[in-house]
Image (cartoon, coloured by chain):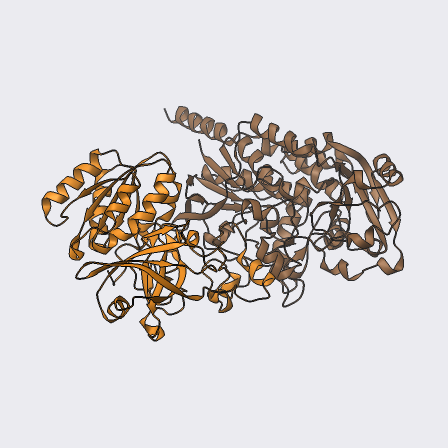
């Protein structure tokens, strides 16, 4: 039995991509250089799209100049800012849970680009909101910008187990976010709200010393509780909640350590709970090309920026937690 | 009770399900689309040439019900058309529901829109097949009858692209080679050293779209042959065809139509623009494939290496039949191989000795002969059918071609095989065991 995974970009306007042109397609066996069909079918034939497109990739994501329209330094290492997309780009294309973009300052070379999760979108105003933790040279350089940024996106594979979020209807859901990982909770919550789900979120400020997702979540009608996740009292409380709280979907936005704890608690509960987690792989290009997110999973090298799968398949294999 | 899982509900899968059920197994058919019969939904030709013999052999062997349903659903019997004698043309618009009701009536479980994509193995034994929604269907023995045509990528790489045939891959997803997932590498048929597969040999016109005269003649006689103007003769199409029994000069020079409920046009594809210039075809439109102006499905892309018991080589509990089991063409061929595969699946589940059909029977000879041919360098370039080309010649040469029911029944009886597929092996084994227990008490 082979590992079950799909390509997040198949069936998107960006498929076929560079990988199809280089015999490296994630979905199609013929576009891997094989003789016959044996694909990871996602509802359409990637090879057919490739041929009809003149044996070329579709137009890849472009880098756009975007205006910063709001910027707030919340703590000494956390900035929340809002950008206005130019008319050529639509914020609704950035509103799927797990959407992220690559950002850099206008005058920085391309290797200053880094991936950042879209915290929220406003389709009426065509804006995107980000929370950014200042960590190293790339984020520090970006933090100095006040007017314009370069943005490349949208990219969609920020969450493993995405189908559980998208397909959840009238369920009881628990979202757990710590530090900057909580930024990914908002789009998850928006999708769950659309499905009529009952949502509780646990937030821990972690090293950013604030909860930038709190207000946004509360405005969606999510019950928010703030906790300090470190230490055993929290673990016991969470165990009790997962065992007896009646939750059917759990999402963890945070570090690998947090994911592993949540996964262990879900497994120990013996209950049927669907788990989704934030994708913490180191990403550089988002196109499956550069190799920085490539990870050995079950004997196969997978580009985690594009490979969508159940969280259990990739947890514990990623060296860059 | 042993559980036999059939993957693919085409004619071969229906044959396998029937035989496994008769042998006493619990049977589940997994079918990726919403209907049984696969290509049989648009085929319809039975009993032409040597297929008559094979059908009668199957009946004498005790598993002829599917042939009887086809006979009972015939629009025309005893039809002759170029190169072919005594054909039965069943009504493709009626037969599926009849087969479905018949199999359900036997207590066979049919799961539609259930596409098998992978297997769960223990060593070289399959413990379950995995469906596209991750469900695992467990069983004791498995029969793969997923065919060898398509999917979209193969039809595009080796044909003229997806022409929207009755298999409807874009809607129901591609067939997956289960034998390959279980570790047995596929054999791929060839047209030339670089070109894989072969193109399905007929397309179907909507009968109501044809002129009154043609339609009337077709419904009356079952067959209409119309000579083509020279400019519309495309002989190169003959070499493309799967169905070498219809790759005759006559089929390039003329339009041969058969009444199967649709008007079956015996050529892989036909430019609608050209076709409409011919009298009586001014309003013609295609019924299958929908884009038959352009091409047809590509087949023989995925055959499993197997032995003469229909067991897939290298896998302990997987059998195969139909196109999956070699470059064999046709419903009759699918049903006959299916019956043996289903019966042997039940034997395997009961740990009984497997059955090989003797070469005195056309079914037994074809199963063995195709296997021998596949081991030669030309094997992958040929197609085999009771209905024509080299295998029909062989039948005639070896005296296997018989058209008298009584003679066929007698032969099967002489071989000690009368009604062998009717034996409930589960009950038989129970009786053996209790007899043994009684004897040892």
Quadrant into which the C terminus of chain A falls: bottom left
Indicate whether B47 appears above or below B249. above
Relative to residue B113, is residue A85 drawn left or right? left
Relative to residue B326, is residue A182 drawn left or right? left
Residue at position x 62%, y 55% in the image = B300
**Residue A74 occupies quadrant:** bottom left
Instruction: Please state the horizontal and vertical placement of residue B158, each as a whole percent of the image.
Output: 63, 61
Q: Is residue A87 visible?
A: yes
Indicate whether A162 appears above or below B262. below
Indicate whether A259 appears above or below A238. below
Of residues A271 and A173, the one drawn nearer to the viewer in this rendering: A173
* Chain whose colour in the figure is orange: A
Instruction: Please state the horizontal and vertical placement of residue B51, each as a whole percent of the image.
Output: 73, 43
Q: How many marks?
A: 0
Q: Is residue A300 visible?
A: no
Instruction: Please state the horizontal and vertical placement of residue A172, each as a whole percent of the image.
Output: 29, 35
**Residue B196 occupies quadrant:** bottom right
Relative to residue B10, is residue A319 drawn left or right? left
Of residues A180 and A4, the one drawn nearer to the viewer in this rendering: A180
Relative to residue B23, is residue A218 drawn left or right? left
Residue at position x 47%, y 26% in the image = B431
* Chain whose colour in the figure is brown: B
Instruction: Please state the horizontal and vertical placement of residue A94, each as a whole percent of the image.
Output: 40, 54
């Amino acid at each position: 039995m082979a590992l079950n995974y799909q390509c997040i970009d198949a069936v998107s306007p960006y498929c076929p991509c560079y990988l199809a042109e280089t015999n490296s397609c994630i979905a199609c066996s013929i576009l891997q250089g094989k003789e016959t069909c044996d694909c990871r079918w996602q509802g359409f034939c990637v090879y057919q799209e490739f041929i009809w497109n003149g044996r070329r990739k579709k137009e890849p994501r472009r880098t756009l100049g975007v205006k910063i329209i709001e910027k707030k330094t919340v703590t000494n290492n956390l900035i929340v800012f809002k950008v206005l997309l130019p008319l050529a780009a639509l914020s609704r294309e950035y509103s799927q849970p797990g959407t992220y973009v690559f950002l850099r300052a206008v005058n920085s070379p391309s290797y200053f680009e880094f991936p950042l999760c879209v915290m929220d979108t406003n389709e009426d105003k065509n804006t995107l909101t980000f929370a950014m933790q200042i960590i190293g040279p790339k984020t520090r350089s970006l933090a100095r910008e006040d007017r314009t940024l370069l943005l490349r996106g949208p990219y969609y594979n920020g969450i493993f187990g995405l189908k559980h979020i998208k397909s959840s209807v009238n369920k009881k859901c628990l979202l757990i976010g710590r530090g900057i990982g909580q930024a990914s909770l908002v789009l998850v919550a928006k999708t769950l709200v659309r499905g009529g789900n009952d949502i509780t979120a646990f937030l821990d400020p972690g090293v950013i010393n604030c909860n930038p997702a709190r207000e946004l979540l509360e405005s969606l009608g999510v019950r928010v509780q703030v906790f300090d996740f470190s230490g055993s009292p929290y673990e016991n409380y969470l165990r009790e909640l997962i065992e007896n709280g009646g939750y059917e979907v759990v999402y963890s936005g945070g570090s690998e350590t947090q994911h592993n704890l949540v996964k262990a608690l879900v497994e120990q509960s013996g209950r049927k709970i669907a788990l989704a987690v934030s994708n913490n792989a180191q990403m550089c290009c988002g196109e499956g090309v550069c190799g920085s997110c490539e990870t050995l999973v079950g004997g196969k090298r997978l580009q985690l920026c594009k490979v969508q799968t159940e969280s259990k398949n990739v947890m514990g294999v990623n060296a860059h937690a | 009770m042993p559980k036999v899982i059939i993957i693919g509900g085409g004619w071969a899968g229906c044959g396998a399900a029937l035989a496994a059920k008769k042998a006493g197994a619990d049977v589940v058919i997994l079918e990726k689309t919403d209907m049984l019969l696969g290509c049989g939904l648009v085929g319809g030709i039975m009993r032409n040439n040597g297929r008559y013999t094979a059908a009668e052999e199957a009946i004498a062997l005790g598993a002829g019900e599917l042939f009887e349903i086809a006979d009972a659903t015939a629009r025309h019997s005893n039809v002759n058309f170029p190169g072919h004698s005594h054909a039965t043309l069943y009504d493709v618009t009626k037969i599926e529901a009849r087969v479905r009701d018949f199999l359900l009536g036997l207590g066979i479980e049919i799961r539609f829109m259930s596409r098998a994509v992978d297997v769960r193995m223990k060593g070289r034994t399959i413990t379950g097949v995995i469906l596209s929604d991750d469900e695992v269907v467990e069983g004791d023995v498995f029969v793969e009858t997923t065919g060898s045509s398509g999917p979209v990528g193969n039809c595009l790489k080796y044909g003229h692209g997806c022409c929207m045939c009755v298999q409807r891959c874009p809607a129901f997803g591609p067939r997956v080679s289960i034998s390959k997932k279980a570790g047995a590498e596929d054999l791929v048929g060839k047209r030339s050293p670089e070109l894989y597969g072969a193109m399905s040999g007929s397309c179907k016109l909507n009968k109501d779209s044809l002129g009154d005269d043609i339609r009337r003649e077709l419904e009356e006689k079952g067959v209409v042959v119309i000579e083509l103007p020279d400019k519309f003769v495309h002989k190169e199409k003959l070499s493309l065809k799967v169905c070498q029994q219809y790759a005759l000069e006559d089929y390039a020079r003329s339009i041969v139509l058969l009444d199967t409920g649709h008007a079956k046009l015996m050529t892989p594809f036909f430019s609608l623009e050209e076709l409409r210039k011919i009298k009586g075809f001014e309003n013609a439109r295609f019924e299958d494939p929908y884009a038959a102006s352009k091409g047809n499905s590509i087949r023989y892309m995925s055959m499993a290496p197997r032995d003469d018991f229909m067991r897939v080589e290298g896998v302990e509990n997987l059998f195969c039949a139909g196109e999956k089991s070699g470059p064999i063409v046709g419903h009759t061929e699918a049903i006959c191989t299916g019956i043996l595969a289903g019966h042997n699946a039940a034997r395997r589940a009961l740990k009984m000795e497997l059955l090989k059909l003797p070469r005195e029977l056309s079914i037994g000879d074809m199963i063995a002969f195709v296997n021998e041919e596949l081991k030669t360098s030309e094997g992958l370039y040929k197609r085999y059918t009771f209905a024509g080309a080299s295998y029909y010649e062989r039948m005639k040469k070896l005296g296997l071609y018989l058209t008298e029911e009584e003679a066929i029944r007698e032969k099967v009886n002489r071989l000690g095989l009368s009604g062998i597929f009717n034996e409930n092996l589960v009950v038989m084994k129970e009786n053996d065991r209790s007899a043994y227990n009684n004897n040892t008490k």
